[in-house]
Image (tube, rainbow, N blue to C red):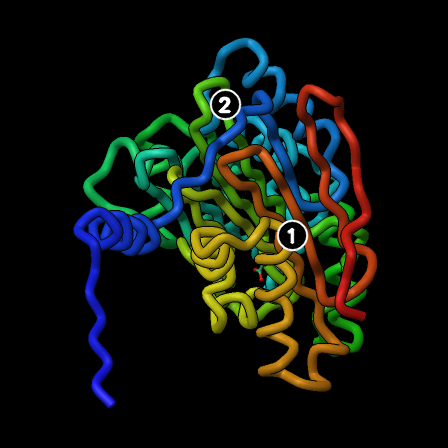
Amino acid sequence: MKISISFHPIVFGLTLLAILFSCQPKIEEVTFKGPIAIGTWNVPEATSEAYKVLSTGGTAIDAVEVGCRLEEANEQGQSVGKGGLPDREGQVTLDACIMDSHGNSGAVVYLKDIVHAVSVARKVMEETPHVMLAGDGAKQFAIEQGFPVENLLTEKSKADWEKWKETSSYKPVINIENHDTIGMLAMDENGNLSGACTTSGLAYKMAGRVGDSPIIGAGLYVDNAVGAATATGLGEEIVKNVGSFLIVELMRQGKSPQEACEIAVQRIVDRTGDKAKDFQVGFIALNKKGEYGSFAIHKGFSITKHDVGGNANIPSPSYY
Ligand code: GLY
């Protein structure tokens, strides 16, 4: 039997158009809900300062810097800036990075004696041809840029370190005082995204150890066309997963910020198995629509958000 198929030219044209349209990438409509700042952990003062910048027409990059600076200056927080817990030699060393809506970034690692690591990172981004400065070079650059030099080891952190030395037993603490690396993400009135991340790293780390926080893609990533993500917790595991970049790429593929954070945590748990019971990692993410999400391996992590609806600390869902 002979089967003959003939196409009417109009039917053929419409079919061709349908095929062509189905091959086009979907362009999602972005509904702008107004500026928003989010941060890792319970940091309402930081998100409030950031939102003040945003609600008066300031930029996302200024907002995240201001928010991180507030936590760096807070001596009570023992995981960021002044008052941060030292390494096992008793030295407080800071890591930080920042990324703007144009894809520019700056970072400092192993920075000593300068409180505002996030602002030095911004200067690296804006004033140098480089992305990252480390150790003595980072400190020298900060001094040249006018940053004051001061001892970051407070009496409290020194006393805690002296006590730790009695046993010198090393185990990263999950949710240290419910306050760890501060990562902040913001979207400004123009819908532009930026992020920043600052930490004194793991308490009693080996001298010279650097975690995820100053590593673009691991501790922080921003793509102004898609969204932004930042991380907290055991940096070694975040680096191995390039966690923040992964989350932004998942959002690019259509995942919500919440789904993307959950998948990134799941990847770490899948790779590390039972070891994940002993360490914490938390992610927060923000997309171009102003939607946000967070997820952690363990309970105790939280996200703080400030948008037109107010300033609120929200417990994060977790794997365990
Ligand atoms: N997430 C901070 C660090 O591991 O250093």
- The three-letter amino acid code for the residue at tag 1 is Gln
Residue 154, given in percent of the width and then of the height, sits at: 70, 44
Amino acid type, residue under disc 2 in the picture: Asp
Left or right of 60, for residue 77 = right
Q: Nearer the viewer, residue 52 or 4?
A: 4
Asked whether residue 195 appears in the rendered view, the answer is yes
The residue to which callout 2 is attached is 188
Q: Which residue does the image show at 68% across and 44% down from the upper left?
A: 83
Q: Nearer the viewer, residue 187 or 232?
A: 187
In the displayed structure image, the side of residue 243 where residue 16 appears, left or right: left
Tell me the tag on residue 258. 1
Residue at position x 65%, y 35% in the image: 71
Q: Residues within 10 Å of mark 1 (few under 14, many from 20)?
A: many
* Nearer-N-terminus badge (1/2): 2
Q: Judging from the image, what secondary structure is the residue with disc 1 in?
A: helix
Q: Position of residue 72 (x, y in %)?
A: 61, 37
